[in-house]
Image (cartoon, grey):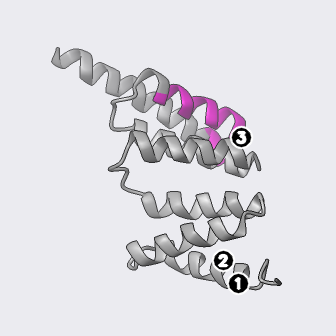
């Protein structure tokens, strides 16, 4: 069964790379489709968690915030050991902010800052938090 699993990984990686090429071109629709197919066809592959997150990222870039949030939730639930959880939290906050769910956006940012103080995402998170503190506080 060794050859089969490595073959699947090769295919998963190929689709993942295709997604990445579209991502770089800024074609988020095609990129999302490629990442989505990695997740659907190779859900247990090491590329699947990253592909799942990137599918959500593409939706966020397309300003489809609700589907993006749903995709991030799926990534969270399906891949609890996803390594870039700090980035996932940042993009969750961006989507929530886009939907004007400011309190929930703040919660995601605070979780990022608290749990991942060393993260490269911390500075943008803090900046967004400052910005959100100026919003929705009347009343």
Identity of the residue furthest to the left in this view: 2
- The part of the image, by quadrant, that contains residue 68 is top right
Q: Which dot marks residue 133?
A: 1
Measured from the top left, where is residue 111 in percent x and y?
A: 47, 71
58 horizontally vs 15: left or right: right
Task: Please report the residue visible at 76 percent of the width from the left and 85 percent of the height from the top.
Answer: 134
Give above or below for 39 relative to 4.
below
Measured from the top left, where is residue 17 in percent x and y?
A: 49, 36
Asked if labels 2 and 1 touch by Cβ distance under 8 angstroms, the answer is no
Which comes sooner in the sequence, label 3 or label 1? 3
Identity of the residue furthest to the right in this view: 138
The residue pinned by badge 3 equals 27
Q: Nearer the viewer, mark 3 or mark 2?
A: 2
Measured from the top left, where is residue 42 in percent x and y?
A: 40, 25
Could you tell me which quadrant the C terminus lies in? bottom right
Q: Secondary structure at mark 3?
A: loop
Which comes sooner in the sequence, label 1 or label 2? 2
25 horizontally vs 3: left or right: right
Q: Secondary structure at mark 1?
A: helix
Crowding at dot 1, Cα within 10 Å, few <14 / some 14-19 / many 20+, comes out as few
Q: CA distance from mark 3 to mark 2?
A: 26 Å
- The part of the image, by quadrant, that contains residue 2 is top left
First to last magenta residue range: 22-39
The residue pinned by badge 2 equals 128
Give above or below for 117 relative to 30.
below
Q: Nearer the viewer, residue 21 or 138?
A: 138
Measured from the top left, where is residue 82 in percent x and y?
A: 37, 50
Q: Nearer the viewer, residue 107 or 28?
A: 107
Question: Is residue 116 at all visible to an observer of this figure?
Answer: no
């Amino acid at each position: 069964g060794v050859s089969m699993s490595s073959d699947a990984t090769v295919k998963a990686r190929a689709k993942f790379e295709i997604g990445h090429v579209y991502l770089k071109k800024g074609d988020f629709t095609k990129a999302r489709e490629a990442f989505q197919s990695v997740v659907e066809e190779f859900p247990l592959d090491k590329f699947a968690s990253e592909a799942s997150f990137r599918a959500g990222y593409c939706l966020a870039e397309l300003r489809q915030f609700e589907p993006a949030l749903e995709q991030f939730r799926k990534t969270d639930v399906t891949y609890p050991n996803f390594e870039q959880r700090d980035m996932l939290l940042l993009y969750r906050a961006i989507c929530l902010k886009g939907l004007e769910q400011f309190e929930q956006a703040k919660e995601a940012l605070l979780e990022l800052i608290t749990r991942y103080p060393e993260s490269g995402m911390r500075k943008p998170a803090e900046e967004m938090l400052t910005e959100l503190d100026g919003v929705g506080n009347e009343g």
